[in-house]
Image (spheres, rainbow, N blue to C red):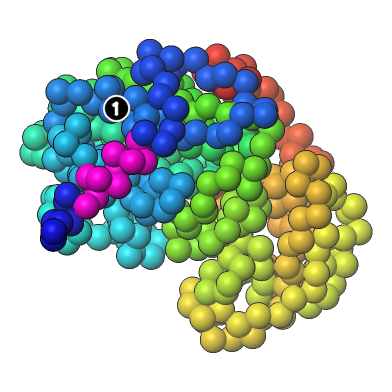
Amino acid sequence: MKLSRRSLLATTAAVAATAVPAVPAAQAEAAPRGRGRPLRTGFERLAADGYAVLAGQRVGVVTNPTGVTRDVRHIVDVMHADRRVDLRAVFGPEHGFRGTAQAGGSEGRYDDPATGLPVYDTYLKSGQPLADVFTASGVDTVVFDIQDVGARFYTYIWTLYDCMEAAALAGKRFVVLDRPNPMTGREALGPVLHKEFATFVGRQPVAQAHGMTVAELARLFNAEFLATPVRLETVLMTGWDRSSFYDASGLPWVPPSPNMPTPDTALVYAGTCMFEGTNLSEGRGTTRPFELLGAEGLDGRWADAANALGLPGVRFREAYFAPTFSKFEGKTVGGVQIHVHDRDAFDPLRTGIALLVTAKRVWSGFAWRPDDWIDKLTGSARVRTMIDAGADTDEVVGGWRTELTAFRRTRGRHLLYR
């Protein structure tokens, strides 16, 4: 007997749903203690409960290539094949639904060849224009399922924020399916955004490394920042411990964006992405973006200066590389490779600041990007002006202590896992 693609997917989806112990939807708001229990993502719990949260709803999904099951089937394919879900649309963020676009790009409006579903572009849309997209799609409920990496300037959390705001304007319900924070959820680190520096790499006063999951951020956004809260539901994970790194999850790593190839990248990104705000390469165009940093004229003095600080959990290797695109394309540059040897001790924010401070001291060619992009990344002009004034690492890190303490109090009200 010849089966259609939809019938075949429906069969496999039903098997996958029954393979996970069912968890009542009503329990989705109470996340049990993670240690010692197998992790189940928000989507796994949604499917195990027969998609009860979506019953009777016309559904649209905000997602990208990271929205996969543990056997790496995309959730859109799984739900499209399941008659229990009335899936009507997909909404793609930066880099696109299927992930074909580089940084600063998206895939536009098209029909997905695999499912026939309309795919709408959300990138750089917000407010009423994005609400109009949701209205035009004809959905009742917008579902969000994207793997975040834990840094304020990673744009998917602001896609979450913009979509929540737009869903409220359009009168839509909003459901967030949770996934782990690969940096762990132990604590928040770094400077907090000042509202006058708000952009798409930071809409609201959040710490640079927020230490939250997307469901926790959704709760924070709804309670603290949205003028009109959205009708929000969150389907939480079970088995996730706040102290766990991504490799403890048992989940496959799908690059959330083209320059986030491994969980190791995510571990350093909240600190080393600040080099986007300088004239140094942040490693784009190499196989180790954000772990390799450098520029023409830099040499082993930088690694020596950074190692001399004795930063916890990390060492620096003198490195030379030739980016295939982005800064210094096709040129051989010198710099450092970051080697994290103790993840528990490693502090990506202190490390990033230390590398900025030492790069400026050992290399006379150091410069900030002329558009003050560093201010947008760090959330204020303070990091740039303090480093320019000769401040050392401890002084710069101490500069955000008060605002970080205040954010940690706010954050604590919205944490959903022990």
Q: In this view, does 348 lie above or below 415?
A: below
Left/right of residue 82 with respect to residue 38 in the rendered view: left
Can residue 163 be seen here? The reply is yes
Q: Up-down: is 102 above or below 320?
A: above
The quadrant in which the N terminus is found is bottom left
Q: How crowded is mark 1: few (under 14 residues within 10 Å), some or many (20 or more)?
A: many
Q: Does the magenta stretch include residue 14?
A: yes
> Which of the 4 quarters of the picture holds residue 245?
top right
Q: Which residue is drawn at 48% across and 77% down?
A: 325
Residue matched to label 1: 50
Region of the chain picked out in magenta, as a range: 8-17
Magenta segment, prevailing SS (helix, strand or loop): helix
Percent of width and height locating residue 121:
22, 50
Quadrant the C terminus occupies: top right
Judge whether residue 166 can be spotted in this image: no
Residue, x 67% and y 29% (percent of image)? Answer: 36
Task: In the rendered view, tell whether residue 382 sits above or below residue 264.
Answer: above
Q: Nearer the viewer, residue 257 or 67?
A: 67
Residue 312 image point, x, y percent: 85, 47
Is 39 in front, or is 315?
39
Residue at the farthest front position? 1
Q: Is residue 58 left or right of residue 238?
A: left
SS class, disc 1: loop
